[in-house]
Image (tube, rainbow, N blue to C red):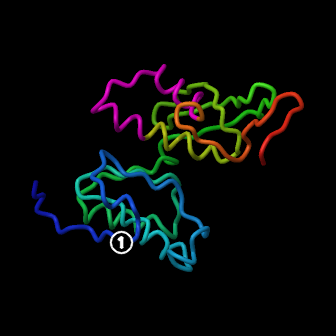
Amino acid sequence: MDSGLPPVPRRLDSTNIIDPLLSVITNIGYDHMDLLGDTLGKIASEKAGIIKNNTPVIIGETSLETEKIFLDRAEKAGSKIYFADQLFSCSLGNMNYMNGERRYILTMHETGESFEGKTGLGGDYQSNNIPVVACAVEILRNKFDISETHIEKGIEKVMGNTGLSGRWQILNKNPLVNQK
């Protein structure tokens, strides 16, 4: 279907072989500067290559150095853009290493409404990731029937549902061994 918009340059990202329901850029950091550029702006320009025409895009974290790059690319693509950290915030409790759970409170800024849950992922960075998940769910609710229970169980059981493993994973409970 021709949108009448010029195609957005698709550069280095492997997601460029698909046409997604939405695109997500969790954060911009210096972790791939050898491939993507030596400034946050250059890295953001490369990451913005996943923004597809007429496809919503979520940016996990707002940054003065990158915000305009994403806004401009989304506008050129005719794509609605959401900055998750402007819409939601998340606070984390301490990790309970014996049961492998960490409690969180997710708050929607617009309404002040809060939701409490738990996750099996222990790293502090989950306070940035959970708002991205909440933002994605709000967008996808237009296409799928997603209940609060689905969200709660999805975040709580993310390792089992996806096979995701890594830092802070509980490897053994007796004796307690976790991967940091």
* Numbered label tally: 1
Image quarter where the N terminus lies is bottom left
- Residue 121: image x %, image y %? 66, 38
Q: Looking at this view, name the residue that lies furthest to the right.
A: 175
- Residue 128: image x %, image y %? 59, 47
Q: Looking at the magenta stretch, what is its main secondary structure?
A: helix
Left or right of residue 155: residue 47: left
- Residue 146: image x %, image y %? 38, 25
Q: Which residue is mark 1?
A: 11
Magenta-colored span: 136-158
**Which residue sits at x=23%, y=53%?**
54
Which of the two residues, 149 or 114, is positioned nearer the viewer here? 149
68 to 82, vertically: above or below: below
> Residue type at mark 1?
Arg
Left or right of residue 32: residue 10: left
Q: Quadrant of residue 29?
A: bottom right
Give neighbour class at mark 1: few <14, some 14-19, many 20+ (Cα, 10 Å): some
- Residue 31: image x %, image y %? 61, 67
Indicate whether residue 137 is drawn in magenta.
yes
92 to 5, vertically: above or below: above
Q: Secondary structure at mark 1?
A: loop
91 to 149, vertically: above or below: below
**Which residue sits at x=50%, y=52%?**
60
Indicate whether residue 17 is drawn in magenta.
no
Which of the two residues, 148 or 83, is positioned nearer the viewer here? 148
Q: Quadrant of residue 105?
A: top right
**Which residue sits at x=60%, y=35%?**
159
